[in-house]
Amino acid sequence: MESNETIIQEFKVLGIPIEKFSIYYGLFLIIWGIVISFISGSDSFTSYIPAFIGIPILIFAYLSVKFENRKKLFMHIVVLFGLIAFLGGLDLIRTIISGYAFENFWADLSKTMLAITGFYFTLQCVKSFIHARKMREQSN
């Protein structure tokens, strides 16, 4: 059983530990990519990009839970893919500037989702890293 000190020191997003939040985010991206590809009837490889970003997030977030001693490494890999999601979503800016925003509704919806959720996810991961560092410094 976890001690109260461990529970207090754990960084949470929406009431859940960042590692589990990362697992849920990875699953969300995978499901989004599959569902949007199905709904839009797209045969394009690019419609699955959210799923391809979600897979490594899911895998490495799971590994961070499974192998506690390597959590720092795995969560740094997770945040890298969160940043990739955010940056990929920023391609929406190019579409807006070119004057073709939402002509391909499903693609631009996916880009919007990636930009917003990727930013939020990356921000929460960075906050969790800062929190972990502060907790480490306080325990020393």
Image (cartoon, rainbow, N blue to C red):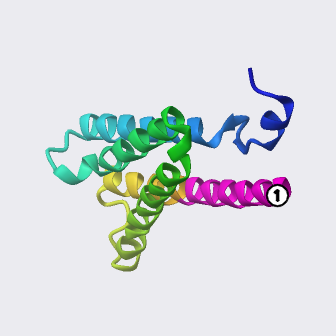
136 in the magenta segment? yes
Q: Main secondary structure of the magenta part?
A: helix
Q: How many marks are shown on the rendered structure?
A: 1
Q: Residue at x 32, y 54 (%)?
A: 107
Helix, strand or loop status at disc 1: loop
| Residue 13 shows in this picture | yes
Q: Nearer the viewer, residue 33 or 108?
A: 33
Q: Point out residue 44 in the picture as x, y percentages from the top left corner.
A: 16, 50
73 in the magenta segment? no
Point out the image quarter for the C terminus.
bottom right
Alpha-carbon neighbours of circle 1 within 10 Å: few (<14), some, or many (≥20)? Answer: few
Q: What is the three-letter code of the residue carrying label 1?
A: Asn
Point out the stretch of residues depicted in magenta: 119-140
Q: Nearer the viewer, residue 109 or 121?
A: 121
Q: Residue at x 32, y 42 (%)?
A: 33
Q: Point out residue 138 in the picture as x, y percentages from the top left corner.
A: 85, 57
Q: Point out residue 85 in the picture as x, y percentages from the top left corner.
A: 42, 58
Q: Hey, which residue is sitting farthest front in the picture?
A: 140
Establish if 9 lies above or below 105: above
Q: Point out residue 87 in the picture as x, y percentages from the top left corner.
A: 43, 67
Hey, which quadrant is residue 130 in on the image? bottom right
| Residue 28 shows in this picture | no
Mark 1 = which residue? 140
Q: Residue at x 83, y 38 (%)?
A: 8
Q: Hey, which residue is sitting farthest bottom in the picture?
A: 97
Establish if 40 lies above or below 101: above
Q: Nearer the viewer, residue 83 or 45?
A: 83
Point out the image quarter for the N terminus.
top right
